[in-house]
Structures are given as structure tokens and as C-alpha cells.
């Protein structure tokens, strides 16, 4: 359940839009392939971290520490990259989790805007983002995540009801299936790749789950907990994407919540539920970014008697910056696709492949060096997907700014 919860988030809510960007047949095939590639990358990541910790006779390594320790046993030509990759892993973790915070800000604003447009007056979503600053600063002042547990439990249980509402709307009044595109304009395909990677990846959280298991050995393997969780997520992504696109067709919005009717209590209830859930989840993502930045780079540079006050100020600064970045880039589809393609191609694919190459260097890469070939292909896929998936959202964002088009779609 924790694996599924760690991966499922805003990504599954934009699955119908991702299917629109690829076409239903293309999306079914591509989602399955990407899901299996992500599953393989997570397997070699966790196996590599477990193996290197076993060799060093320590309980567990963090993601960044695992990369550094693995490189020490890898090919000599890669060992000089230890310091660079330690910094790179922490930097990408920060950018990914900070980018997720920005996605949450846009998502919350869109949910509230849908309610405001119907019940009050039509405002730009960026006005609602500004109103998020004070609540986010207050919730970021909570020093201990345990204080959020009661609210997180309420949010998690309410999400079941929220997803039930979405399923109800998705499975009623379906459009004629022949109206759907099996393949979409290929120029939109990179947006699909970025959004799908975002939906499947949660590298920091997946590593943390293994570190807290009673029997870590049951986590990996073909029948392990990780495989079971990700396969369920793949099926949910396929179901959600296909039926959401089938129900709304070309009229689908960035997140499926925006396609629900505004004049029905059930639709608006779902918006309130998901807005509250994302508000509670915002500091959970933010604390990872804070931990990476504060504990690795800033904490040792400040006086001990000033550490708590400065950390509190840093937390609020991060919350405010996430809102400001969201205001500057308020298109949910584009920012989510960029974060997914740019950060997760490294965190979810390239770095696990580097760990696998390094850990297997002394023991061998199997018959015909199949494991080395698989890792190289994983890196090539990540580079191509990362470049195309990052370039297209940036290009479209620039075009939207130049043309003066509404950026909040």
C-alpha cells in the first residue's frame, strides 16, 4: 500500500490528458512499456543499493550515498565522478521535489478556481495561487511531520471517496469509441512521456520504504512488494487514462477534475477532497527538498543558536518560491511534463543504470554481458526521453508567452 501511495499522485489525474497527447492505442502500448522499464530500473536501483550496503556492512545507504559507494567499485573511468554525482543526485532530488511542490500549487489553484468560477466570479488561477502563500507558510512552520499524521489520514481516506466520484463520472456517458484517436500528432508525444514518467516515479520515497521494512529482502524480485505495487500502478494508469480519454475525448482538460461538472455536488466535492489532499501533501514533498538543501549544504554554514530560526525561514522561503514559480509557469501539463522528463530521466533511469554497471563490474555482467547492455539501453532511453520530453514543454511555454495565450490551461 505504501508503494502504491508513494507513486500515485497528481500523475494519475493527468493520465487522460496524457492519453490524448499520445492517442489511445499508442498510449496503451507506451504506458505499459514505460511502466515495465521503470519497474526494471527500480529493481536494479534497490538491488544495487542493497548489495553495496551489504558489502560495506552497513544497514542502509541514502540514494546519493549509494551512488557514490557504488562508483567506488565500478569501472576506473567512472570513479572520478563520485563528487559530481553526489551533488547531481541531491540537486535532482531537490529540483524534482520542488517541482512537485509547484505542480501541487497549480493543482490546488485549479481546483479552487473551478469552484470560484461557478459560485462567485471568474478570476485568474494565479490569484488563487497568491492566496496559497499564507496557508503554506503556516503549515511549513510545523517542525515535525508527525503533527500532520491525523490530517494525512483524513486526506488518504477521503481520497478513496474522491477517486470513487471520478470513476462514476468516467464510466457514465462514454463517447463513441471510434471518435478517439488511436495515434495523436507525434509532436505531442513528448508531453505524454514526461507526464507518464512523472506518474510512475517516486525515487526518494521508494528508497525510503525499503529502508523501513521489517524484511527488506521481500522488497525486490519478480514477485517482490515493489513489483506488485508498480504492476498495480501500471494497471491503474492504463484504466484511468483510457476511460478518462474515452469519456471526455478532445475536451479533456489538464487534470480530469477540471472536466467534472461544475454544477453538481459530487464533482465539487471531489475538487475539495483533492485540493485538501494536495495541500497536506505539499509539505511532505517540500520536506524532502528542505532536507536535501538544508542538511547537505546550508546547516553546517550557520551558527548553532541561529539554526532553528534560519531553518524555519528557509522552509517558508521554499513555500513562497514554489508559489512564485507556479505563478510564472501555471500550465499544469507543461510543468508536470518538464519535471517528469528532466528530473526523473536521471533519478529514475540513468542513476540506477550507473549503480548497476558499477556494482556488477567485479562480478560480471552475465552471459553476453546482457546486464551491461540493458543498462546502456536504459541510459540511451533516458537521454532521448529526457531531451525530447524537456524540450517540447519549454518550447510550448515560450510560445505561449510570446503569443500572449492563456497559460493556465
Image (tube, grey):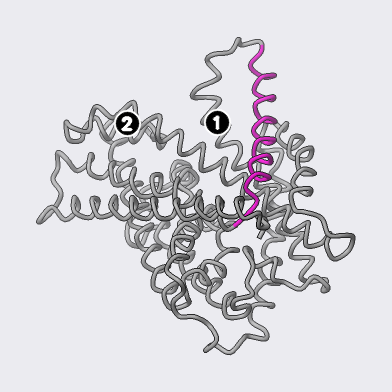
Label 2, label 1: how far apart the Cα atoms are: 19 Å
Left or right: residue 401 versus residue 4 is right
Give the quarter of the image for residue 26: bottom left
Q: Is residue 371 left or right of residue 93?
A: left
Label the magenta part by its dominant secondary structure.
helix
Q: Which residue is mark 2?
A: 68
Q: Residues within 10 Å of mark 1 (few under 14, many from 20)?
A: some
Q: Which residues are magenta?
A: 306-332
Q: Is residue 154 visible?
A: no
Extreme residue in the left direction? 368
The residue carrying pointer 2 sits among few (fewer than 14), some (14 to 19) or many (20 or more) residues within 10 Å by Cα, namely many
x and y percentages locating residue 380 in the rendered image: 28, 52
What residue is disc 1 on? 291
Q: Which quarter of the image is occupied by the C terminus?
A: bottom right
Q: Quadrant of the N terminus?
A: bottom right
Q: Is residue 97 left or right of residue 49?
A: right
Q: Is residue 308 in the magenta section? A: yes
Residue 117 horizontal/vertical position (percent): 83, 62
Amino acid at each position: 500500500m505504501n508503494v502504491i501511495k508513494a507513486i500515485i499522485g497528481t500523475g494519475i489525474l493527468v493520465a487522460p490528458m496524457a492519453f490524448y497527447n499520445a492517442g489511445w492505442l499508442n498510449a496503451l502500448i507506451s504506458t505499459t512499456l514505460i511502466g515495465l522499464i521503470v519497474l526494471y530500473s527500480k529493481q536494479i536501483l534497490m538491488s544495487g543499493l542493497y548489495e553495496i550496503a551489504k558489502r560495506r556492512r552497513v544497514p542502509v545507504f541514502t540514494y546519493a550515498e549509494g551512488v557514490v559507494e557504488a562508483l567506488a567499485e565500478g569501472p576506473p573511468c567512472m570513479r572520478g565522478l563520485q563528487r559530481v554525482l553526489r551533488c547531481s543526485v541531491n540537486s535532482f532530488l531537490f529540483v524534482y521535489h520542488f517541482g512537485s511542490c509547484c505542480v501541487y500549487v497549480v493543482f490546488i489553484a485549479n481546483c479552487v478556481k473551478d469552484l470560484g468560477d461557478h459560485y462567485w466570479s471568474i478570476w485568474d488561477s494565479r490569484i488563487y495561487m497568491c492566496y496559497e502563500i499564507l496557508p503554506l507558510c503556516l503549515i511549513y512552520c510545523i517542525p515535525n511531520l508527525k503533527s500532520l499524521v491525523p490530517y494525512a489520514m483524513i486526506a488518504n481516506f477521503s481520497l478513496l471517496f474522491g477517486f470513487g466520484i471520478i470513476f462514476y463520472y468516467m464510466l457514465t456517458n462514454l463517447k463513441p469509441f471510434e471518435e478517439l484517436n488511436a495515434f495523436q500528432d507525434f509532436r505531442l508525444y513528448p508531453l505524454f512521456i514526461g507526464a507518464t514518467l512523472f506518474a510512475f516515479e517516486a525515487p526518494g520515497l521508494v528508497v525510503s520504504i525499503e529502508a523501513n521494512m521489517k524484511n527488506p529482502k521481500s522488497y525486490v524480485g519478480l514477485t517482490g512488494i515493489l513489483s506488485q505495487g508498480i504492476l498495480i500502478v501500471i494497471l491503474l494508469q492504463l484504466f484511468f487514462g483510457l476511460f478518462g480519454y474515452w469519456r471526455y475525448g478532445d475536451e479533456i482538460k489538464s487534470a480530469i477534475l477540471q472536466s467534472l461538472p461544475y454544477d453538481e455536488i459530487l464533482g465539487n466535492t471531489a475538487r475539495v477532497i483533492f485540493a485538501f489532499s494536495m495541500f497536506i501533501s505539499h509539505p511532505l514533498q517540500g520536506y524532502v527538498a528542505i532536507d536535501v538543501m538544508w542538511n547537505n549544504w546550508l546547516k553546517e554554514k550557520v551558527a548553532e543558536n541561529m539554526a532553528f530560526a534560519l531553518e524555519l525561514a528557509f522552509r517558508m522561503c521554499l513555500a513562497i518560491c514554489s508559489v512564485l514559480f507556479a505563478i510564472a509557469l501555471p500550465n499544469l501539463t507543461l510543468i508536470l511534463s518538464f519535471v517528469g522528463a528532466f528530473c526523473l530521466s536521471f533519478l529514475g533511469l540513468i542513476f540506477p543504470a550507473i549503480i548497476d554497471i558499477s556494482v556488477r563490474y567485479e562480478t560480471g555482467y552475465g552471459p553476453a554481458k546482457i546486464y551491461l547492455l540493458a543498462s546502456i539501453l536504459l541510459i540511451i532511453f533516458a537521454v532521448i526521453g529526457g531531451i525530447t520530453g524537456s524540450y517540447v514543454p519549454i518550447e510550448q511555454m515560450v510560445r505561449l508567452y510570446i503569443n500572449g495565450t492563456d497559460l493556465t490551461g
